[in-house]
Structure formats: structure tokens, C-alpha cells
């Protein structure tokens, strides 16, 4: 196994442990214990902590090592609101400049989401949103939105994916696509902003449920 691949796989496993509620917010991640449990050396473990720090799930402290750093529901809400406003504005601009080829790319991205596996869902969802915004020709703004999307959803991909969530998001994408085809900027922005805010809800619920479970466990002990 290559070193980088080992670090990514280790990060995936630790991410799952955090999101499943194995560790409370602020809990230390003991290198020796995790290395033994996961069957890895400390080198890929430290690299995994660095990857998870970029996602906002782990904080690295010089005197405490790695600790769990879950976002607050308020942080998620604010990031979603920021992304919704920027993407809604940019989508209106993109619709004005879109060609038939641009619309075809957006349709292809939507079609891919209808048949993809859960593992590929996030990648195709990102492709849809990037195809939606590309005709605006604002690469620096799109890069900023990509970073916001990563902070919002990369760490919560698994809790968000469900049959119901997929069906809802596909319906919302179809509405967005229809507005884009008709170049109805006002309706496009409204549908897109609602879609982004709603997509953040499962992540917020996951954090709240995790905290309730942890509080219940402390009360029972």
C-alpha cells in the first residue's frame, strides 16, 4: 500500500469513528491507541490527522496533540447561507451566458446522478454545480465556492446519503435545470438557495443527534 493511500484510508476510518459518535467534541485522539486499533504506524496516522484538520474534524494542538473538533450547527448554517447567496448570484450570471453545449453538460451531470452509486454521489453532485456555474467564467469565485462546499459536506457525506435525500436532491436539481434552460434568473436563484440550505440540514441534524447521544451516555454513566 502506498504511503499517501494509507493516510487517506486511515483518515476515512477515523472520520467514520468521529461521525459515528465514538469521540466527543474536544476529545483527544490518542496516537498509540488508534495505531493499534487501526493496525497502522504513527506516520500515516499523523498524516491522517492533518487531512482531517483540513476538513475541520480535527484540531492539532502543540501541547495536546490531535483533538476532535466538530463544527457547531450555527457554523454549518452560516456556511450554507454564504454559499447559497454566492452561488445563486453566480448561477444567474451563468444562465445569461450559457450555450447549448453548457446546457448539455449540465444535463449529463444530472443524468449521471440518477444512476450513480452512493460512493460516487458527491463527485457527481459537485460536477453538477460546477457545470451550472462554469458559463459565468468566474474561476476564482468558483474556487471559493468549492472550498465552502468541502467544508460543509466532505465530512458529512455518509450521513447525508439516503434514498430519500437522493430523491429530494434530484427533484431540486431538475427544477434548477429547468430554470437554467429558461434563463429565469430569479427563479433559478431562489430554487438554488433553497436547495443548498436544505442540503445542509442533514449535517446539522447529525451533529445535534450526536451531541444528544453523548449527553445521554454521560447521564447514564
Image (cartoon, helix red, strand yellow):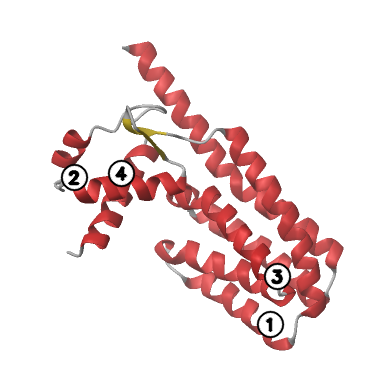
Q: Mark 1 points at which residue?
A: 102
Q: Where is residue 186 in the image (x, y as percent from the top left)?
A: 86, 62
Which one is in front in this view, the residue at disc 2 or the one at disc 1? 2
* For residue 53, above or below residue 174: above
Q: Earlier in the sequence, mark 3 or mark 2?
A: 2
Q: Where is residue 1 in the image (x, y as percent from the top left)?
A: 17, 64
On the image, which quarter does residue 120 sit in?
Answer: bottom left
Quarter of the picture holding the C terminus? top left
Task: Measure how far apart labels 1 and 3 are at the Cα level.
Answer: 15 Å
The residue lying furthest to the front in this view is: 62
Task: Measure how far apart labels 1 and 4 are at the Cα level.
Answer: 39 Å
Q: Do the residues labelled 1 and 3 touch (CB within 8 Å)?
A: no
Q: Nearer the viewer, residue 180 or 50?
A: 50
The numbered dot on residue 14 is 4
The number of discs equals: 4
Q: In this view, does 20 lie to the left or right of 94?
A: left
Classify mark 4: residues with Cα within 10 Å, few (<14), some (14-19) or many (20+).
many
Which one is in front in this view, the residue at disc 1 or the one at disc 3? 3
Classify mark 3: residues with Cα within 10 Å, few (<14), some (14-19) or many (20+).
few
Q: Residue at x 80, y 70 (%)?
A: 93
* Secondary structure found at label 3: loop
The numbered dot on residue 138 is 3
* Secondary structure found at label 2: helix
Amino acid at each position: 500500500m502506498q504511503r499517501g493511500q494509507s493516510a487517506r484510508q486511515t483518515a476515512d476510518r477515523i472520520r467514520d469513528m468521529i461521525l459515528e459518535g465514538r469521540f466527543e467534541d474536544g476529545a483527544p485522539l490518542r496516537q498509540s491507541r488508534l495505531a493499534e486499533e487501526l493496525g497502522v504506524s504513527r506516520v500515516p496516522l499523523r498524516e491522517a490527522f492533518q487531512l482531517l484538520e483540513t476538513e475541520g474534524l480535527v484540531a492539532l494542538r502543540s501541547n495536546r496533540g490531535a483533538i476532535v473538533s466538530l463544527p457547531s450547527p450555527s457554523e454549518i448554517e452560516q456556511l450554507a447561507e454564504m454559499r447559497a447567496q454566492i452561488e445563486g448570484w453566480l448561477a444567474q450570471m451563468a444562465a445569461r451566458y450559457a450555450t447549448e453545449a453548457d446546457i448539455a453538460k449540465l444535463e449529463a451531470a444530472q443524468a449521471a446522478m440518477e444512476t450513480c452509486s452512493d460512493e460516487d454521489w458527491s463527485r457527481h453532485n459537485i460536477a453538477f454545480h460546477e457545470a451550472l456555474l462554469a458559463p459565468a467564467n468566474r474561476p476564482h469565485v468558483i474556487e471559493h465556492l468549492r472550498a465552502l462546499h468541502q467544508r460543509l459536506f466532505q465530512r458529512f457525506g455518509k450521513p447525508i446519503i439516503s434514498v430519500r435525500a437522493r430523491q429530494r436532491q434530484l427533484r431540486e436539481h431538475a427544477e434548477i435545470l429547468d430554470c437554467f434552460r429558461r434563463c429565469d434568473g430569479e427563479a433559478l436563484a431562489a430554487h438554488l438557495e433553497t436547495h443548498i440550505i436544505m442540503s445542509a440540514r442533514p449535517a446539522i441534524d447529525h451533529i445535534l443527534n450526536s451531541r444528544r447521544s453523548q449527553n445521554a451516555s454521560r447521564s447514564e454513566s
